[in-house]
Amino acid sequence: NPGRFAEFIRAARKARLGRGIGLPGRVAETGDPAWLTDVNKELTDRGIESAGGLNLKSAAAFPVKVDSEVLAVFEFFSDKELLPDQRVLDSMASIGTHLGLFIVRKRMKRRIAELATLEQQRIGRDLHDDLGQQLTGVALLAKSLERDLRKESSPHADRVAEIARGLKEAQTHVRLLARGLVPVEIKAHGLIKALADLAHSSTKRFEIDVRFVPAVETLPRDSETATELYR
């Protein structure tokens, strides 16, 4: 019956406890599970007067940690008098360790994704700013050489024109690659616009009719999720 505990939950959430203060504060400080068979004073000290009508009697808390670092504390209350049980305490400690490892894996996964994105952005910038600019410069030189050769009616003018066109196409491909690695339009216009542009550029690049048809009107707006889906 969630409604029975609604007032207690609201009051408990308002309480702010430092390390060493209250049951969860003590667990956070020591890193060990703890048990209370009389929670009245505990709740009174926290200013949770609304718990009286619930007739709460016992409480237990255990840490979620990795090595010696406490990442979180889980706290449980009961309206029955429950004596400390070493088997339960051991199980709670084991669960806390597994949860801690899960949190660390999530953190590592997020960090790896961030590092991969940063590296992709760096490669994209290098492609655009370095290789792209070099291709642009060489293409301009080729175009200038083509004009000079045509003025001289040289038979090599057409061959140089082909080289200039090839450089132009390579420049376009580099720009498309850079945009794929650094999809700035995701932040500016949203994922749907980015995917529509990707379909359009793929059509032009590979000469295959690619269409993007969104099944929904909106997609995730936060940059991290949108970028992962885009890739």
Image (cartoon, rainbow, N blue to C red):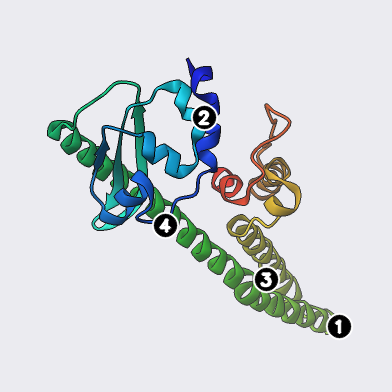
Circle 2: element type: helix
Residue flagged by tag 1: what amino acid is it? Answer: Lys
Residue flagged by tag 3: what amino acid is it? Answer: Ile
Residue flagged by tag 4: what amino acid is it? Answer: Ile
The answer to whether any part of residue 172 appears in the image is yes
Q: Which residue is mark 4?
A: 112
Q: Which residue is mark 3?
A: 163
Q: Whole-Å distance between the Cαs marked 2 and 3?
A: 82 Å
Question: Relative to 175, does residue 190 appear above or below in the rendering?
Answer: above
Disc 2 vs disc 3: which is toward the camera?
2
Front residue of 19/103: it is 19
Query: Which quadrant of the figure has residue 55?
Result: top left
Badge 2 local density, few (<14 within 10 Å), some, or many (20+)?
some
Q: Residue at x 52, y 59 (%)?
A: 117
Of the numbered discs 2 and 1, the one sitting upstream in the chain is: 2
The answer to whether any part of residue 155 appears in the image is no
Of the numbered discs 4 and 2, the one sitting upstream in the chain is: 2
Marks 3 and 4: CB-CB under 8 Å? no
> Which mark is drawn over residue 100?
none
Image coords of residue 67 (percent x, y) = 23, 56
Q: Which residue is mark 1?
A: 151
Q: Residue at x 73, y 82 (%)?
A: 141
Q: Whole-Å distance between the Cαs marked 1 and 3?
A: 18 Å
Question: Relative to 136, does residue 166 appear above or below in the rendering?
Answer: above
Badge 3 local density, few (<14 within 10 Å), some, or many (20+)?
some
Residue flagged by tag 2: what amino acid is it? Answer: Ser
Disc 4 vs disc 1: which is toward the camera?
4
Q: Whole-Å distance between the Cαs marked 2 and 1?
A: 95 Å
> Which mark is drawn over residue 50?
2
Of the numbered discs 3 and 4, the one sitting upstream in the chain is: 4
Image coords of residue 65 (percent x, y) = 29, 50
Image coords of residue 83 (percent x, y) = 19, 28
